[in-house]
Structures are given as C-alpha cells and as structure tokens.
Amino acid sequence: MLSILYPYRNRDSKRIKRSFDSLLEQTNKNFEVFFIDYGSTPDLAVDIKRLCQNYPFISYQFYPTQYQPWNKSRALNSVIKNLKTDFCFVADVDVIFHPEFVETAYNLTKTGQTTYFQVGYLSSSESRKTKAFSEYSDYRLSTNEATGLSLFPVAQLKELNGFDEFYHFWGAEDTDMHIRLKNAGYGVKFYDEELLLLHQWHPSYQSRERTGSTSELKLSGILPLNHQHLKNAMKNGITKINNDSWGENLSKEEFDELEEAALFKEVTNEKRQVEDVLFGQLPGFKTGIIKIRIVTDPFEDTLKYKTKRLLGKKVPEYYTLTEVNDKVLLHLISFYRDIPYSVKVNHDNYEIEVAIKFS
C-alpha cells in the first residue's frame, strides 16, 4: 500500500475537496491518506475534519500548534516515524492528481529510490474551476528545481531521522531531504515523462509576509535563513539530523497547560529587558512553565522621551514590535523547538506572550 501524506494548516476547504476528489478517481485504489492538521484555527479544523470523514481512505490527525510557527517537517515526521508501508508520497492540499498517479507511483517504487514529479501550476482563474484532470489547460510546468512533491522509500527517511525540523514557515525542507538522501548514497530522480500533478494557485509566503495580517505568525528573513541552512547541508554532506524526539508534537494536554499557566513576568520592549529575558533568564529555567509577556513601554511614546532623545540625552533604547517578534521567534525555533512552547503576537495591544514548559 502507498501512504499519501498531506501536511496542512488554514487553507480553504474547496481546494482540499478538489484534491480528495481526484483521489477518488484513481485507477489503483491501494493507497491510504494521512491528513496532518498542524494547528489550524479551531473552527476551520472542525470543518476540515468533517470533510476528511467523507473519504474512508483518510486518517485525520490534529495537533494544537496554532501558537507555534508552521513546521512542515515536524508535521510530516509525526507520521513518517510510525509508518508501516514501504513508500510514502508527500502531497500538498493544493494538488490535483491524475487518475493514474497511484498506478504510476507503484511502478516507480520498483527503482527503490526517491522520485519527485513535474507539476503543472494552474493560473489563479483556472484554480477556481472544478473539472476533470485532462480538461485543465491554463498552467505552467515546473522544472527539476521544484522538489516539493516526492515519492520516498520510508526506510530511507527513517534512517535519516526524517525531514530537518529546523526549517520553519516555508522554504527548503524538501530540497534538503533530497540532498541528504544523496549525501547518504541514495538515488533521487525527477519524473517528467508525463504530467501527473496539477497545483492550485495560492499567494506565496513572501507575499503573505509583506502583508499586515495579524492572524499569522511571521519571521522576517526566514526564507534566506532556511536557504543558508540548506547550503550547509550541501557543503558539509549532512545526512542524519534531529534528535531522538523527532516527529513529536505538542499534545492537547501540553497545550492546555501552557494556556492555563499563570503569568511569571511582564517586561517592556526596552532592548536590555528583552535581551535579558532571552539570553539571561530563559537559559536558567530547568523545570515548570515560564510565561512572559513583552509589552510596549508607554514612556517610549511620551513627549518627554522624544524631546530627550532629540536633544541627544541618555534615554532607554527600544525594539519595535516587529523586532521583538523576530528575536523571540528565532530564539524559540533555534533553542526550544523540541519542548512545549507557545507564542502569541497581539498587534492591536502591541504585546507578545511566550510560554515554555521546561521538564
């Protein structure tokens, strides 16, 4: 049996239904689907779970990670670590499958290597239509640089501890996996003999990063950082990554503990206070839950402060909310990603709340 993995967060149900319906049309029915909801909003999660229940071949899993950055690697690893099948295909909720995709995938498993597929990227208008695979026409073809839709030997993924969980938000985790497989001596091949996958249009992460939306965690400059991490894997021949807890995610019990924990401390956005929390205080905690709120110092907006600063007098130095956000998120994904944590950014009240559970 072929396992198909969908990592997901907060996408509309219409595109997902198109993808699921294309699986109903498969000539080879010997497949199973794992749908991994990595922290969608509660209302949307209920709707998506209900949609999944309409398809008997789908197993739905929800993780309460809505107050953590998107991490495709960890979502996928949560399933890969326990897979019993020999091959898995990493899908995308935007993908529409050719009716013979599963049949072709089975034939490609005989090579014993990873295969990634050419994709037809549908235009925005074409993506809103529902029709047979062969009837879609307005798309552009991907090259071998697009690595996101791949058929993997499961044993090889497990040997290398799955996808690298350093990668957060979007960018490079798929290519990184291919590189590490090659570094370990395994084959990776691009399949473009026929078009078997179409991709429904959506705004890029870069465009969402530039918007003023307050509902989605963001980290400035994360894409260049991810690609620099990728270059390191290439240059240094990295193969196995992550620690022994790879693929483990925040549980409902841990989520509730973080939510219910009392506030430990409130500090302002003064630079020395933020830096002391991140580099001076957090490393010293060993047990329990630490919840810290960072708020904007009202003094920063006073005439007295602005006048003294204009006159060159000594005044506190402050980070903007965006700078605090970036420092906090980068710190969390770098040093605390393997333990329970949450981060809430409230742009309306100009504050950030962080909770971390130390064991």
Image: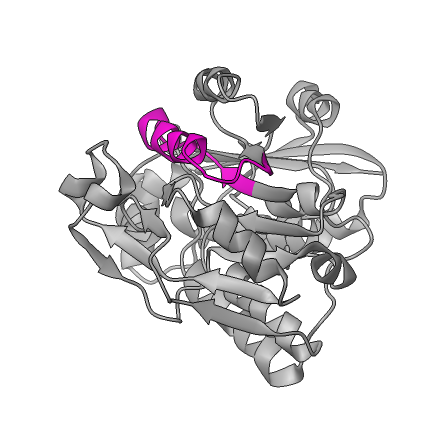
Q: Does the magenta stretch include residue 158?
A: no
Q: Name the one closer to the observer, 167 or 142.
A: 142
201 vs 148, left or right, is left
Rendered location of residue 96, percent (x, y): 36, 42
352 vs 32, left or right, is left
Q: Which residue is drawn at 39% across and 42% down?
A: 99
In the image, residue 40 above or below residue 188: above
Q: Quadrant of residue 291?
A: top right
Q: Residue at x 69, y 30 (%)?
A: 264
Q: Which residue lies furthest to the front in this view?
A: 27
Rendered location of residue 91, percent (x, y): 49, 46
Q: Is residue 28 magenta?
A: yes
Q: Quadrant of residue 95?
A: top left
The segment highlighted magenta reads 5-32
Rendered location of residue 166, percent (x, y): 61, 58
Say whether residue 272 is visible: no
Q: Which residue is drawn at 69% across and 56% down?
A: 162
Q: Which residue lies furthest to the bottom in this view?
A: 235
Rendered location of residue 351, percent (x, y): 46, 34
In the image, residue 326 above or below residue 299: below
Q: Which residue is drawn at 65% across and 71% down?
A: 181
Q: What colour-coding does the image apply?
A: one colour
Q: Name the one closer to the observer, 322 or 76.
A: 76
339 vs 164, left or right, is right
In the image, residue 164 above or below residue 232: above
